[in-house]
Structure formats: structure tokens, C-alpha cells
């Protein structure tokens, strides 16, 4: 028998992802949130397919942005869909996807 989640429980899933993976700086925890065939649609790079590749991508970002912090701005939930608006801030302290370390602060 499958369990039906409440809206509050559905919202809690991406909140835990942000808290544990980004703010907790632990890309390996992403495995708890993705299936093996998951697909990451990112605006700055091509789609990334497969949990191992997604974890690698997150590791590259988190490793290069050592003080990364995502702050929730808004959450919209309807049925089984949840959308979050976040503001992410960080300092680029390491090389990231071919971009040399700059020491500059970023925000998106």
C-alpha cells in the first residue's frame, strides 16, 4: 500500500535537499533524493543524466563554492508538484567546470 503525502510533507522533501546537499555541503546526500535515471536540467550546462553524474556535478559546484548557501524565498505546492524559489550565494574558492578560482562572490 502506497502512502499519500500531505502538501506539507511534499514541501519538506526539497527543503531537506537544500539543507542537506547545498547548505550541508554534502553532494553524496543527493543520492537519497534521485533515482538512478534522474535528469538534471541546468540553465548553464547541458542536461546531466544519472544519479552518479548529478552527484559529480553537485560535488564540482559545492567544492568550488565552499561557502555556498541557498536561502528559500518562496514555495508553491499544488498536488504532487512543488516549486521553490531560492537565492544562492557563494564565493568561488576553487576551479569550477573549467573556470579558474576567482575569489569573487556570486549570487543567483
Image: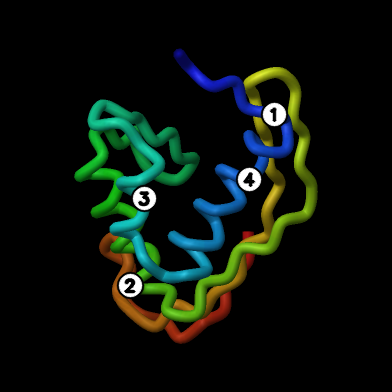
Q: Give the structural element (helix, strand or loop) at label 1.
A: loop
Image coords of residue 39 (percent x, y): 35, 30
92 with respect to 96 (left or right): right
Residue that numbered label 1 is attached to: 6
Residue that numbered label 4 is attached to: 12
Residue that numbered label 3 is attached to: 30
Q: Give the structural element (helix, strand or loop) at label 2.
A: helix
Name the image quarter holding residue 79.
top right
The mark lying in front, picked from 2 and 4, is 4
- Label annotation for residue 63: 2
Q: Residues within 10 Å of mark 4 (few under 14, many from 20)?
A: few
Image height of 48 relative to 20, above or below: above
Q: Quadrant of the C terminus?
A: bottom right
Q: Quadrant of the N terminus?
A: top left
Mark toward the start of the polypeptide (2 vs 1): 1
Q: Residues within 10 Å of mark 1 (few under 14, many from 20)?
A: few
Q: Give the structural element (helix, strand or loop) at label 3.
A: helix
Mark toward the start of the polypeptide (4 vs 3): 4
Which residue is rendered at x = 57% and y = 45% of the image? 14
Which residue is rendered at x = 34% and y = 60% of the image? 27
Label 2 – label 3 distance at C-alpha: 15 Å
Label 4 – label 1 distance at C-alpha: 10 Å
The outermost residue toward the front is: 1
Describe the colour scheme in one phrase. Answer: rainbow
43 with respect to 15 (left or right): left
Amino acid at each position: 500500500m502506497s502512502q499519500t503525502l500531505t502538501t506539507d510533507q511534499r514541501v519538506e522533501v526539497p527543503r531537506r535537499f537544500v539543507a542537506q546537499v547545498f547548505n550541508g555541503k554534502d553532494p553524496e546526500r543527493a543520492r537519497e533524493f534521485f533515482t538512478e535515471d534522474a535528469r538534471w536540467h541546468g540553465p548553464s550546462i547541458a542536461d546531466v543524466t544519472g544519479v552518479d553524474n548529478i552527484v559529480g556535478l553537485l560535488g564540482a559546484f559545492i567544492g568550488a563554492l565552499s561557502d555556498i548557501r541557498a536561502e528559500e524565498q518562496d514555495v508553491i505546492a499544488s498536488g504532487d508538484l512543488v516549486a521553490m524559489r531560492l537565492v544562492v550565494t557563494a564565493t568561488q574558492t576553487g576551479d569550477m567546470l573549467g573556470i579558474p578560482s576567482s575569489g569573487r562572490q556570486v549570487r543567483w
